[in-house]
Amino acid sequence: MSIVTVQLGQCGNQVGHELFDVLCSDALEGQRKVYSTAGCERFFHQTSRGELVARAVLIDMEPKVINQSMSRAAKCGMWRYGESSHFSQKQGSGNNWANGYCVHGPRHRDVVEELVRREVEPCDRLAGLMAIMSVAGGTGSGVGTYVTQCLRDIYPKSFILNHLTWPYGTGEVIVQNYNSVLTLAHLYQLSDAILVHENDTVHRICGQLLNIKHISFGDVNRVIAHQLGSVLQPALTADSHGVYGRNPLGELVSALACHPEYKLLSVCTIPQMPSSSMAYSTFSWPSMLKHLRQMLISNAKMEAGIDWQVRPAAASERTRSLTGSGFNRSLANLLILRGKDVYSAETGGFEDPALYTSWLSSEAAFNSWKSPVPFNKYEKCATLVSNSQALLRPLDDMVGKAWNMFASRAYIHQYIKFGISEEDFLDSFTSIEQVISSYNQLH
């Protein structure tokens, strides 16, 4: 089954390019025919000349990033984008969600839907659609939300996963918190699951784990692509009978997003290190999984931030408030293990009922996928995708900042002139505050 990816805005197109690079490099590494075939079928189709062409649509309101992505893919020699699978204009959305959602999206709906249809129809079976976008700017967030709405209308029974890049807390765009609130509130009604990467976290990984001195957006995007690829590449589920899972998006949603109130997913991966260090490092599954479990419990996004003092609260206790420094309770977790001796890895620590909400059994809340094939040059690699309280603090911070601006009516006129009313803002605030409340009350 195949996944059609829709890359939206500058961030979405840059992350998407890095993701396809990782997927292709990993699939073609060494003599791994079954794995390679399964991986390529998901994300690429093959021309009569044997070329791998990404199952992707590239959308931006400015042509520069799309042209760069198309050119870089063609030059790499391993894969390329379709020659007519992109759409751009000469004028951007001005970092305004309303401009993207109310103006650019509807204006170009027909051509975008046609581009997606052309990618979907050649698929033998459609596993689902993945939209890659940011929440801070205008095109990625506004047009991205509108396109997701169109995809839901056209493919009502297909799985839709939205991958969101969360802006730096210090600010990239003055109205990024408005854009983020509007994006999340709408996507919560449309998407089956929303997988979030925070720029601040990924930036710390680049500096502290990868030892990158001058961190660029390219470095950040490569880390995101590595983590996304470790989730999306073929793996064996518990009941797959030795056959790689057929529908990765369906299996991901079924494992993690089992309740419509809880759709936010976070990812952490170990190990992550400079390629120059790999040859001198050894990793054991017990050690890796011990660290990964404590990263989950203490809500540490990387090993350097683990708090070993945090312990799961008793099932009878209420969780601490999102402003506390307590234990991170989960609704569901998916552990993906790849590499050497993977079947000897003991995952019982993640089946502990104390990690999970009391109204879902740990057997239902925890799933694991495994593949004996090493990923992205790591001999052993463990990735945890978690539907937990991990995103509560950034979500609450974002809503608080947006509400403070809204209370003083800052920049509201910029949205009203494109068709978003104050009532639309209030509805979005209400929606996200309900999400915060739901996660905060997990017990």
Image: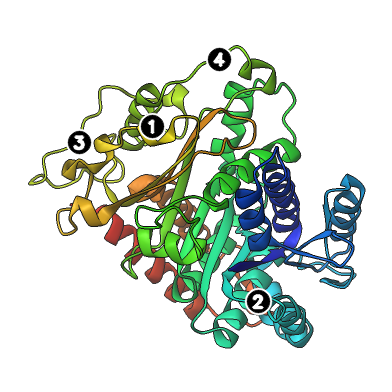
Q: Residue 208: x percent and y percent?
A: 58, 22
Say what secondary structure mark 1 lies in. Answer: helix
| Disc 2 versus disc 4: nearer the observer | 4
Q: Secondary structure at mark 2?
A: helix
Name the residue that disc number 3 marks.
312
Q: Amino acid at mark 3?
A: Pro
Identify the residue at image location x=57%, y=58%.
163
Question: How much space separates mark 2 and mark 4, taking CA atoms?
Answer: 48 Å
Read off the residue under disc 1: 292
Disc 2 marks a residue whose amino acid type is Tyr
Residue 152 picture quarter: bottom right
* Residue 85 horizontal/vertical position (percent): 82, 71
Residue neighbourhood size for the residue with mark 3, other residues' Cα within 10 Å, grouped as few (<14), some (14–19), many (≥20): some
Q: Label 4, label 1: how many angstroms apart (C-alpha)?
A: 17 Å
At a point 39% along the width and 70% down the height, the residue shown is: 431
Note whether 406 is above or below 290 in the view shown: below
Determine if residue 16 is in view: yes
Quadrant where the N terminus is found in the figure: bottom right
**Is residue 221 or residue 282 the one in the foreground?**
282
Earlier in the chain: of badge 4 and badge 3, it is: 4
Q: Which mark is residue 281?
A: 4
Name the N-terminal-most of marks 4 and 1. Answer: 4
Q: Are marks 1 and 3 in contact (CB under 8 Å)?
A: no
Local SS, label 3: loop
Determine which quarter of the picture holds residue 102.
bottom right
Q: Which mark is residue 101?
A: 2
